[in-house]
Amino acid sequence: MNQITLGAALLAALLGTGTAGAQSVYGQVGTTGGTLGYVQHMDSFNLRGDLNFADYSRNFHAGSVDYGAKLKFTTVGLFADFFPVGQFRITAGAFLGKDKISAYGKNSPTSDVLPGEYVEGRVRTRTARPYLGIGWGFGPKAGPGLSFTADLGASYGSLRTEYDVSPGMQRYWGNDRVQQERRKFDDKVRDYRWAPVVRVGVSYRF
């Protein structure tokens, strides 16, 4: 059973506890893309799960190469919310699922990639990434109906990278240069071990 399937099963189990107290559903947008979630309210804390979908494009430079990157995220989030005061909460949990980044070297005046050749880097996160943050909303004393929600925090996870070049680039750069460019690529994407989580949205409490 992969981590997404396991996360979905745990989220389904959370949905199955709906008779224990009040429940909420919510939607958010932010750095994790679009989010749909469910909250099971307890007396002094919440159990919460959500599904996150994101598809980003961005450019970056590493070593002597300009890269165009595509980022695809599909994750399950599982959290516990604790409320020291009012609607303000501290949230701990994890994101389950492998985020993917595919980066392709460009031929340009600032990029040492030959026309018709390719340089490709791929990044995958590990399947479980712990999360810690703060937020607003889902409080135990909130009444039924619509309300505002927000999250601010960070998740952490190690990365696995792969790096490939075309035969023409292998001859042009040579093995030492290929390894040098891979190290520069790895150094650049290492920043993604820490992923900021900033989300806002609305919830509806039953």
Image: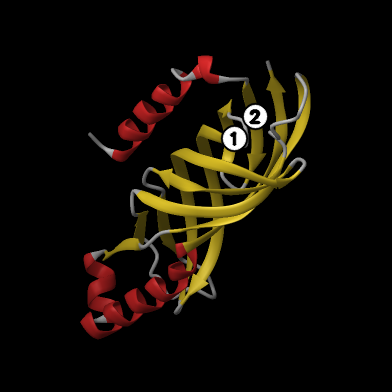
Q: Which of marks 2 and 1 precedes in the sequence?
A: 2
* Residue type at the position of mark 1: Gly
Is 78 in front, or is 20? Answer: 20
* Label 2 SS: strand
Residue that mark 2 sits on: 27
Q: How many marks?
A: 2
* Label 1 SS: strand
Determine the residue positioned at 72% across, 37% down.
137
The residue sitting at the front extreme is 43
Determine crowd level at label 2: few under 14, some 14-19, many 20+ residues with C-alpha closer than 10 A. some
Residue that mark 1 sits on: 34
Q: Are marks 1 and 2 in contact (CB under 8 Å)?
A: yes
- Quarter occupied by the C terminus: top right
Q: Is residue 117 visible?
A: no
Q: Quadrant of residue 158?
A: bottom left
Q: Is residue 24 left or right of residue 172?
A: right
Q: In the rendering, which numbered label is found on residue 58? A: none
Q: Is residue 6 above or below residue 123?
A: above
Q: Position of residue 15 (x, y in %)?
A: 47, 20
Q: Is residue 114 above or below residue 3?
A: below
Q: Is residue 91 above or below residue 78?
A: below
Determine the residue positioned at 56% across, 44% down.
32
Is 177 in front, or is 71? Answer: 71
